[in-house]
Image: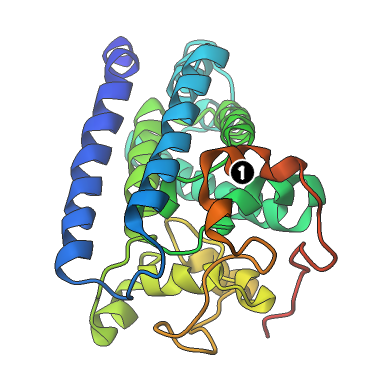
Amino acid sequence: MLDYLHAHEAVVRLTSFTFIFAVFVIWEILKPRRAQRYPKRLRWSNNLGITLLNTVTVRLLVPTSAVAMAITAQQQDLGVFNKLPLSAGLSIVMAVLIMDAALYFQHLAFHHVPFLWRLHRVHHADLDFDVTTGIRFHPLEILLSLCIKMVVVLMLGAPVAAVVIFEVLLNATSVFNHANIYIPHKVDRVLRRLLVTPDMHRVHHSVVVNETNSNFGFNLPWWDYLFGTYRDQPQAGHLNMTIGIEHFRTARELWLDRLLLQPFRKTFKGDLPKPTAMR
């Protein structure tokens, strides 16, 4: 079973991602939340280009994966969950929750540590907000995030099934909560009790620093509620809010070469979002 999951992990993730991506692309076309302000051809070609580059980079530079790390931990009896007498189901649920919490705190760090923010601001500098924003990350951030994830998996001794579930969920929710889709307000109010919705996460992509510095969750919204980083709505409203970063606002900044070089360019005064008391 372990060998099967290891061998087919990439296929499972790619298949699920492709299907979910296609669903939300169609939804964006049929029922968009906001009018797009920049040409989709320009944004999509470069956002998908950096995603392809990330995929190739990871395959070439990282000889293992989070799932392989979970298999190693189980085989070598490493990590917390391999020491505790818990049922398989409880171990899977707890591991997924802990990995999601770890992702929340990683996201906080990427906003408040200058070097990490230089990498992460590539994601935030997109000037529109749609499904491709959810996969637009600098290669160095992808590599660093993968290393952090593997360390967490090894320390936890996370069950293999939990890691596969978490990876599929992460791909799915990253596309979902960045999608430019219309969800009725009443439905959104219910959904955001269990999932990070597009309206909730869009606040995080506001050009207003206090709003950028909120709603850090990817899968679950509970960490934002618990740690006081939740913000309900953008001040300007979803239709009028400005997406992006103040100092990267020209169409030229959307090109692939600018995305790759952006972490090494000048850091402007006030560019780094500062911790802000949300309550």
Residue placed furthest toward the right: 269
Q: Could you classify mark 1 by the number of other residues whose Cα lies within 10 Å: few (under 14), some (14-19), or many (20 or more)?
A: some
Indicate left or right for 22 with 104 as reference: left
User: Relative to residue 232, is residue 79 drawn left or right?
Assistant: right
Q: Secondary structure at mark 1?
A: helix
Q: Visible in this render: residue 90?
A: no
Q: Position of residue 211 (x, y in %)?
A: 61, 76
Does residue 125 sit above or below 206 in this rendering?
above
Q: Residue 261 is drawn in which quadrant?
A: top right
Q: Residue at x 33, y 61 (%)?
A: 179
Task: Give the residue drawn at x 64%, y 60%.
Answer: 248
Q: Nearer the viewer, residue 103 or 82?
A: 103
Can residue 147 be seen here? yes
Relative to 192, does residue 89 appear above or below in the rendering?
A: above
Q: How far across and down, in percent of the image, does residue 183 sit?
A: 24, 76
Residue 15: horizontal and vertical position, in percent?
21, 32
Q: How is the image coloured?
A: rainbow
Looking at the picture, does residue 52 appear above or below residue 123? above
- Read off the residue under disc 1: 258
Q: Quadrant of the C terminus?
A: bottom right
Q: Left or right: where does residue 206 sit relative to residue 13?
A: right
Q: Residue at x 46, y 17 (%)?
A: 68
Tell me which residue sits at (39%, 37%) in the image: 167
Q: How many marks?
A: 1
Q: Name the residue type under label 1.
A: Arg
Quadrant holding the N terminus: top left
